[in-house]
């Protein structure tokens, strides 16, 4: 995993991390669960393998509303940090707002397009995907059905 190293920090600086290597997936996410959890009209998820992520300072708080899905955030300032789902094992998604240099992560697709807010418009030509964009383990199903 030599090469690319990205640094991350929450708004207050209590949580600091780094990721090594290239992300395998970057996407806009219009999912209503993520919208509510993040507190914005959409987010951009940056996908890494868990072994690429290294926590340098602090310990994020975790929350799970859906069985098998764990979100993390800073307990002090509320910055959203990550999303883990047992249905997509070996994939860790970090929110774009956690990165020190978010401009380095251009999205590759629009996911959960069918759930986007009607007043959010995009002029890009990225693929529009109505559901999950990653292969899921059918044993765990879709989080919406859990």
Image: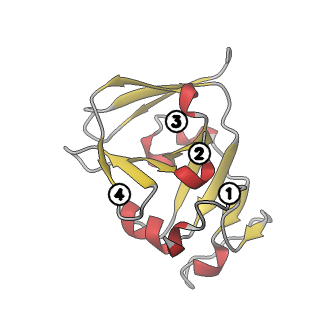
In the image, is 66 to the left or to the right of 116? Answer: left
Spatial distance from mark 3 to mark 2, Cα to Cα?
12 Å
Identify the residue under disc 1: 136
Which residue is pictured at 72% across the width and 59% down the height? 109
Identify the residue under disc 4: 64
SS of the residue at dot 3? loop
Number of the front mark, 2 or 4: 4
Q: Where 114 sits versus 37, above or below?
A: below
Give x and y (percent) for residue 46. 59, 45
Contact check, label 1 and label 4, Cβ < 8 Å: no
Which residue is pictured at 68% across the width and 65% down the height? 110
Spatial distance from mark 2 to mark 4, Cα to Cα?
20 Å
Spatial distance from mark 1 to mark 4, Cα to Cα?
19 Å
Which residue is pictured at 61% across the width and 43% down the height? 47
- On the question of residue 39 being in view, the answer is no
Q: Which mark is residue 31?
A: none
Q: Where 20 sits versus 119, above or below?
A: above
């Amino acid at each position: 995993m030599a090469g690319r190293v990205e640094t991350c920090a929450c708004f207050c600086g209590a949580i600091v991390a780094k990721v090594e290597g290239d992300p395998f997936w970057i996407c806009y996410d219009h999912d209503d669960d993520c919208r509510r959890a993040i507190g914005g009209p959409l987010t951009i998820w940056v996908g890494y393998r868990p072994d690429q992520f290294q926590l340098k300072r602090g310990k994020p708080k975790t929350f799970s509303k859906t069985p098998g899905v764990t979100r993390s955030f800073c307990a002090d300032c509320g910055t959203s940090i990550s999303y883990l789902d047992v249905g997509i094992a070996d994939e860790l998604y970090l929110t774009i707002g956690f990165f020190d240099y978010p401009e380095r992560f251009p999205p590759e697709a629009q996911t959960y397009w069918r759930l986007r807010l009607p007043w959010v418009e995009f002029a890009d030509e990225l693929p529009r995907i109505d559901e999950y964009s990653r292969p899921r383990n059918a044993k765990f199903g879709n989080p919406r059905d859990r």
